[in-house]
Image (spheres, rainbow, N blue to C red):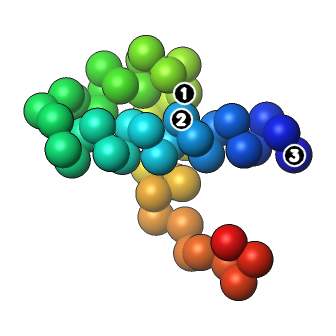
Amino acid sequence: MISQIRLQLRYMAIKEMSTTDTFPVVLLCEIAQVSRAAYYKWLKRTVSVRE
């Protein structure tokens, strides 16, 4: 559960930095040590009622 929260924080940081700054998603994913596929899967997820 905690690891999912940490990943979500990384994904949110990537999303924020890629839209507000001009950093490419590829570079941000490398820095955060997550795969691009996992990031894009998280980005396209459907938000649950619990969230």
The residue positioned farthest toward the right in the image shown:
1
Which numbered disc, 3 or 2, marks the residue that appears first in the sequence? Answer: 3
Viewer-side residue, 36 vs 1: 1
For marks 1 and 2, give the one nearer the viewer. 2
Q: Amino acid at mark 1?
A: Val
Q: Residues within 10 Å of mark 2 (few under 14, many from 20)?
A: some
**SS for callout 2:** helix
- Judging by the rendered image, the residue that carries numbered circle 2 is 10
Q: CA distance from mark 1 to mark 2?
A: 8 Å
Q: Residue at x 59, y 75 (%)?
A: 47
Q: Residues within 10 Å of mark 3 (few under 14, many from 20)?
A: few
Which numbered disc, 3 or 1, marks the residue that appears first in the sequence? Answer: 3
Viewer-side residue, 9 vs 29: 9
- Judging by the rendered image, the residue that carries numbered circle 3 is 1
**26 sits to left or right of 20:** right
> In this orientation, does residue 50 appear?
yes
- Judging by the rendered image, the residue that carries numbered circle 1 is 34
> In this orientation, does residue 37 appear?
no
Q: Position of residue 38 (x, y in %)?
A: 55, 42
